[in-house]
Amino acid sequence: MRALSSFHHNCLRQICNIFWPNTITNTILLQMTNSKCIIDEVTQKRFRWLGHVLRMEGASITKTALSWTPQGKRPVGRPKQKTKKSTTWRRTVEGEIKDLKMTWGEAENKTKNRAEWRGRVSTLCSTWSEEDKYVSKVKANYCSHLLFNISNYRYIKLYPTADIV
């Protein structure tokens, strides 16, 4: 997930024409572009899909596949990972549910009420308060001013005789 987040920030920096040595922090970059952290987006989509699957009828293939475990012994080879770096979708979701201090059964019960689950998922990844929104506007104004100055500097550097007002 760290690599995905890094790629997302690099793409946003290229879109905004922010290059070295004119650098800004990732939080200012996200607030300036009015976008969320990609990890929060993926987590929110994952929980929305989980709610959808857990509300399905008991005989659906998708719900069966979510709780299915293969029979027999595990073959010789690489052992299943027990760290936060999960190898399956279900283990990833179980780890995130544990981070929320919920059990799998509690999550199943809460998904039955669609409105409550949607509210929980939407507030799950929203980290901005009203004060943060105000601060982000101030920082966005500062960053747009900074970008304007940077672009003028580049223009002057390319065309030293040009007059820019």
Image (spheres, rainbow, N blue to C red):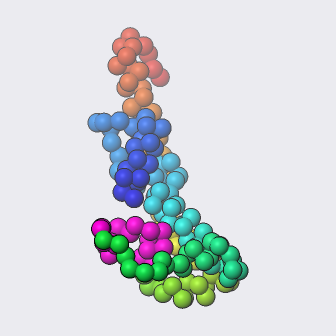
Taken as a whole, is the magenta stretch helix, strand or loop? loop
Q: Residue at 48%, 68% (x, y): give it.
A: 89
Quadrant hosting residue 164? top left
Q: Is residue 115 above or below residue 142?
A: below
Whether residue 69 is situated above or below residue 85 in the rendered picture: below
Q: Quick one: quadrant of the N terminus?
A: bottom left
Outermost residue toward the top? 161
Q: Residue 52: x, y in percent?
A: 65, 73
Q: Is residue 83 above or below residue 156?
A: below
Which residue occupies the foreground of this view, 102 or 56? Answer: 56
Relative side of 41 to 22, left or right: right
Residue at 34% x, 19% y: name it.
157
Percent position of residue 66, x then y? 55, 75
Position above or below: 45 against 31? below
Front-most of residues 142 and 63: 63
Q: Is residue 45 left or right of residue 28?
A: right
Does the segment drawn in magenta span residue 91?
yes
- Residue 20 in view, yes or no: yes
x, y percent for residue 4: 41, 53
x then y, percent, for residue 109:
61, 88
154 inside magenta stretch: no
Span colored in magenta = 77-95
Is residue 114 among the parts visible in the rendering? no
**Which corner quadrant of the image does residue 10 belong to?**
top left
> Quick one: 92 or 27, which is closer to the camera?
92
Residue at coordinates 48% horizontally, 38% vertically from top-left?
15
- Residue plotted at (44% across, 16% down): 163
